[in-house]
Amino acid sequence: MKFLKPHFWYNKSQRNGVFLLALLILIFQGIIFFADFSSQEKVDFNSPQILAFHSKIDSLKLVELENRKPKIFPFNPNYITDYKGEQLGMSLKEIDRLLAFRKTNKFVNSKEDFQQVTKISDSLLNKIAPYFKFPDWVVQRNRNQQKGFNTNASKTKKYGESSYNNKPKHIITSTDINKATQEDFKTIYGVGEKLSERIIKYRSKLQGFSLDKQLFEVWGLKKEVAEKVLEIFKIVEKPIIVKENVNTLTFKQLLKNPYIDYELCKKIFDYRDQVAELQDIKELTNIKGFPLDKYDRIVLYLVAE
């Protein structure tokens, strides 16, 4: 008892404080227990305001879902890949039919041709056909046929044979890619006026194609089109390129190399200053950050002497 007595020994003011605190606790407990805090106002979830709010949310959700859908840009249906076909909603069998047809070196020239080859449904055709983009001369030919022109030619043409045979024929002057003319390149499907001009200009910049893979560097030339070009045009005679001594070239002269930009040119000069003189052109690969994948093309124009 002596141990417990100090814990309950309070003076008068302390006892009053304890009683007041206990009283307040009882009052608040009573208020919480007996008072009704529930709202008498009921929310009508079918009210016009609530329904309009939900309608607005649903419309925003639909807009967001529409924005998340992959956008379709105009494309040539002759070059649909597995991935592209799947995005468009085509089945694997439909894609395989198109790929098998294209392996025969034939082309589809209209949405009707496309459906006949792939066997896609009318609904899917109507969905993706507006995005089909055929070469201008094919579009013009189809318009003429719709107007009644070239009806005799269309009667004699069998389906599946390259309708591109209507394209004006040009006798190729040379199959050497370094001697072929702009008109020669235009005989390849997919190579028009601009691309053939770019091929000629890039060939001049390189002083001639020394490697097949250089053709793939032409800006805007798709890989599959470049491969078709190389099926006809080969490097028969390699260009004669006078190699320049990397040890004596000025900064501006070295920068004229079609595969050397400002940063690489600076690195080569810094390395040349360090070693005083390159003994072998292979020393370029010792430079930190040197593009090894371009080495075989860079050294077409350089030598270390």
Image (cartoon, rainbow, N blue to C red):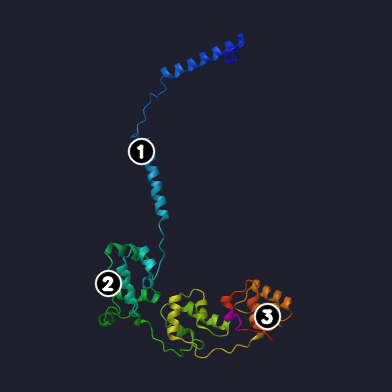
For disc 1, the neighbor class at 10 Å (few under 14, some 14 to 19, many from 20) is few
Give the image quarter of residue 187.
bottom left
Q: Which label belongs to residue 51?
A: 1
**Which percent across, then down, holds residue 181?**
49, 86
Please name the amino acid that badge 2 sits on.
Answer: Gln
Please report the bounds of the magenta region as a residue range: 295-300
| Residue indicated by mark 2 | 116
The Cα atoms of the two marked residues, 3 and 1, are separated by 74 Å
Q: Which tag, 3 or 1, sits closer to the chain's start?
A: 1
The Cα atoms of the two marked residues, 2 and 3, are separated by 58 Å
Q: Vertically, is 295 above or below 16?
A: below
Q: Which tag, 2 or 1, sits closer to the chain's start?
A: 1
Quadrant location of the C terminus in the rendered image: bottom right
The rendered magenta stretch, by its main secondary structure, is classed as: helix
Residue at coordinates 38% horizontally, 46% vertically from top-left? Answer: 59
Is residue 143 visible to us here? Answer: no
Q: What SS does tag 2 mark?
A: helix
Please name the amino acid that badge 1 sits on.
Answer: Leu
Q: What SS does tag 1 mark?
A: helix
Give the image quarter of residue 44.
top left
